[in-house]
Image (cartoon, rainbow, N blue to C red):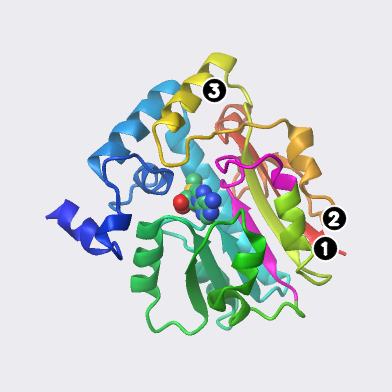
Amino acid sequence: DHEENVARLAPRSSELDEHTPNIARMYDYFLGGSTNFAADRAAAEQLLRAFPGNTEWAHINRAFLGRAVRACAEAGIEQFLDLGSGIPTRGNVHEIAQQVNPAARVAYVDIEPIAVSHARHLLAGNRHVTMTQADVREPETVLAAPGVSGLLDFTRPVAVLAAAVLDIIDTPDPATLVTAYRDACPGGSALVLSHSAALDASTGEVEGAQRVFESTTTPTLRTRERSEVLAMFDGYELLEPGLVPSARWRPVEPVSEEYAVRSNGYGAVGVLR
Ligand code: SAM
């Protein structure tokens, strides 16, 4: 049965708490995946009611990430460090990067056991891709992890991906974190970042969403102003079209204003000079 299948993917049952909603599994539900439990689905539905347009937000964010990864790969970047990579689903970073360049290497990092075991299961036998269980708030640990330091060559450009993760981690200043990863990368490296912002949501809607997050394993949701997100690109030169609602970052088709605000946040790609 479905729940048993999901449980089988967890490494140690003591690590798997299926009764506390979890953003990795809620996000999977939003994207139409099946790696989620009843508590995740209930919280996800609550979030939908608190923050209308949220189903699309997840799709929009995921599609932004895909276009950004493709752009990096097409620009010749062969290595990717995906922070808070999530549960594997459609359009995974290594699939997109390896479509452009079969030799592309991807180091995934996530804190959630189900994301980790699911990815390891899927990636078994793929020498160019690793999955590391770690907390992105500990850059030194992440960078020294065998799955990262053993796979990526930090004397050559690396694209650091932080999509929809810096807004849910409890840390006083995520920009400092970004800097720690930036300082490990040589010139020509990239930063792909997306972050929630109250594009057209009311304060009440954001607070409603925050209340739902309080019931999850990552109880913090911080929307930020555009200027705060822009500051995270310190040292990077933004590629066109700059920091925009994620749906507006090099869309495949023209995007209406109504659709753009459903991004619920900004996205951009920067290159380290
Ligand atoms: N980056 C993917 C994307 O944009 O499609 C997934 C985004 S999902 C909303 C956020 C992910 O960040 C979840 O998989 C969650 O487990 C992970 N996460 C949350 N806090 C984390 C932390 N402190 N360290 C590592 N991963 C974390």
Q: Is 20 included in the stretch rendered in magenta?
A: no
Q: Is 165 included in the stretch rendered in magenta?
A: yes
Position above or below: 114 against 207: below
Q: Amino acid at mark 1?
A: Leu
Residue ranking furthest to the left: 1
- Of callouts 2 and 3, the N-terminal one: 3
> Does the beta carbon of the residue at mark 3 sit less than 8 Å from ligand 1?
no
Q: Which residue is mark 2?
A: 237
The segment highlighted magenta reads 157-175
Please tell me the numbered disc located at residue 88.
Answer: none
Question: Gap in Å between the C-alphas at discs 2 and 3?
Answer: 30 Å
Q: Which residue is mark 1?
A: 272
- Of callouts 2 and 1, the N-terminal one: 2
Question: Gap in Å between the C-alphas at discs 3 and 1?
Answer: 33 Å
What residue is drawn where x is 56% and y is 58%? 66
Does the rendering let one see residue 203?
yes
Quarter of the image with the C terminus in it: bottom right
Query: Dividing the picture into quarters, in which one does residue 245 lie?
Result: top right
- Of callouts 3 and 1, the N-terminal one: 3
Q: Which residue is mark 3?
A: 206
User: Are there few (<14), some (14-19), or many (20+) residues within 10 Å of tag 2?
Assistant: some
What residue is drawn where x is 55% and y is 33%? 221
Q: Are marks 2 and 1 in contact (CB under 8 Å)?
A: yes
Residue 191 coordinates in the image, percent (x, y): 72, 58
Q: Amino acid at mark 2?
A: Glu
Classify mark 1: helix, strand or loop: strand
Q: Is residue 249 left or right of residue 115?
A: right
Q: Amino acid at mark 3?
A: Val
Residue 3 coordinates in the image, percent (x, y): 18, 52
Position above or below: 137 against 262: below
Residue 69 coordinates in the image, percent (x, y): 62, 62
Q: Is residue 162 left or right of residue 173?
A: left
